[in-house]
Amino acid sequence: MTMARIEAEWLRDEVLQKLLAALGAEGEEARIVGGAVRNTLLGLPVTDIDIATTTLPNETTRRAESAGFKAIPTGAVHGTITVVASGRPFEVTTLRRDIATDGRHAVVSFGRDWREDAARRDFTINALYCDADGTVLDLVGGLPDIESRTLRFIGDASQRIEEDYLRILRFFRFFAWYGHGRPDADGLRASARLKSGLAKLSVERVWAELRKLLGAEDPSRALLWARQAGVLSLVLPESERWGIDAIHGLVGTERLHSWKPDAILRLQAIVPPDVERLTELAKRLKISNAERDRLLAFAMAEPARPDETDDALRARLYFGDRIAVQDRLRLAIGTRHGKSESASIGETARLNEQLRIAERFDPPAFPLSGEDIKAVGVAPGPELGATLDRLKRAWVASGFVLSRETLLARL
């Protein structure tokens, strides 16, 4: 057993301390566990705070409510009660051990043994506990792995994966977020050998993990190892022949220009811009309608061209999907990242200028309406629509400067 101590602003929160005191009174124990402890030790932001406790779910509820908090049985059958304190949720879970697993779900029994609870978790860096005073309890060797930024399964990697095959994707996702160097060899071999078990998972779980992986600051190494293990081509076959080489340049460009990590843009970088294949991808992974629409708009948009005039670009922005145009421009800039040839430098500068235009583009209002066209004698129907479209295109081609009077005169 290894121990350490942390100092953190969130740990001094009066609401959290009150909840820990209520749960840990009268011979019971309660500790913060998981991401909050891990991220604090790594110097990263903390968002969610989870608590492990020896109290059973009903007792957790009773103590939370007696302390003036709201308790919601979000996962009481698995030991989890969501305690809402001052509008903030804390997931409080009774110590557990697995009775049976099937690769997707686990049947658990509640207990009081912290070592058993730690042993059933996935990775050593996720199984660290923290007392109310900041003392860190490490029962699985997580502290040395935090120090070396090593992502390692607890115990036997194959056994951990066979308990829940989603841990294969979590292995690469957590490596993208927290790992350094090469992935743990045992974890990598076990992931490659057992990857067929991913077929047992719901596509929603697969996409959620893949999306989080793509949202890491730099997912390029994790994607490379996932491809080497045969995992990436299994969950994202569209990337198999297209390749993932564009990710590295895109990440470098994001850092250079302070772009926020964008999971969907990274996905676009590693799949072909093919409407049919991306439609199938969206259907298979059940991604959201908004994400699907963005993928398809990207596929249908013209590739970025450094030699395109500003007027032509603005016309595309007006008539097309502005986000898709921006996505194409960012990907084009990313593919040229790090290239020192003078032609490439000039193209990159021009693409960056086009991106600035696209980002600032605010489409002006067309000065005519269908009623204006009818007023000069054009009958409602296809002719009216064609006339309106012709005038609109002439207006856009002029740089949006033709006046209402000029357009009417053209009729």
Image: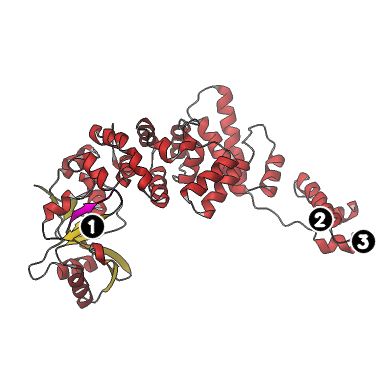
Instruction: Name the residue beneath numbered marker 1.
Output: 107
Instruction: Name the residue beneath numbered marker 2.
Output: 385
Residue 367, image x, y percentages: 78, 58
Q: Residue at x 82, y 49 (%)?
A: 390
> Along the line of sight, which residue is nearer the eye, 287 or 66?
287
**Of helix, strand and loop, which one carries label 1?**
strand
**Of helix, strand and loop, which one carries label 2?**
helix
**Kind of residue indicated by mark 3:** Gly
C-alpha span from label 2 to label 1: 63 Å
Residue 28, image x, y percentages: 10, 66
Q: Residues within 10 Å of mark 1 (few under 14, many from 20)?
A: few
Whether residue 179 is situated above or below residue 404 in the rendered picture: above
Q: Quadrant of residue 21?
A: bottom left
Q: Quadrant of residue 57?
A: bottom left
Can residue 152 be seen here?
no
**Kind of residue indicated by mark 2:** Gly
The magenta segment is 97-103
Q: Residue at x 25, y 40 (%)?
A: 151
Label 2–label 1 contact, CB within 8 A: no
Q: Residues within 10 Å of mark 3 (few under 14, many from 20)?
A: few
> Which of the labelled discs sits on residue 377, or is there none?
3
Q: Nearer the viewer, mark 3 or mark 1?
A: 1
> Along the line of sight, which residue is nearer the eye, 391 or 378?
378
Can residue 282 be seen here?
yes
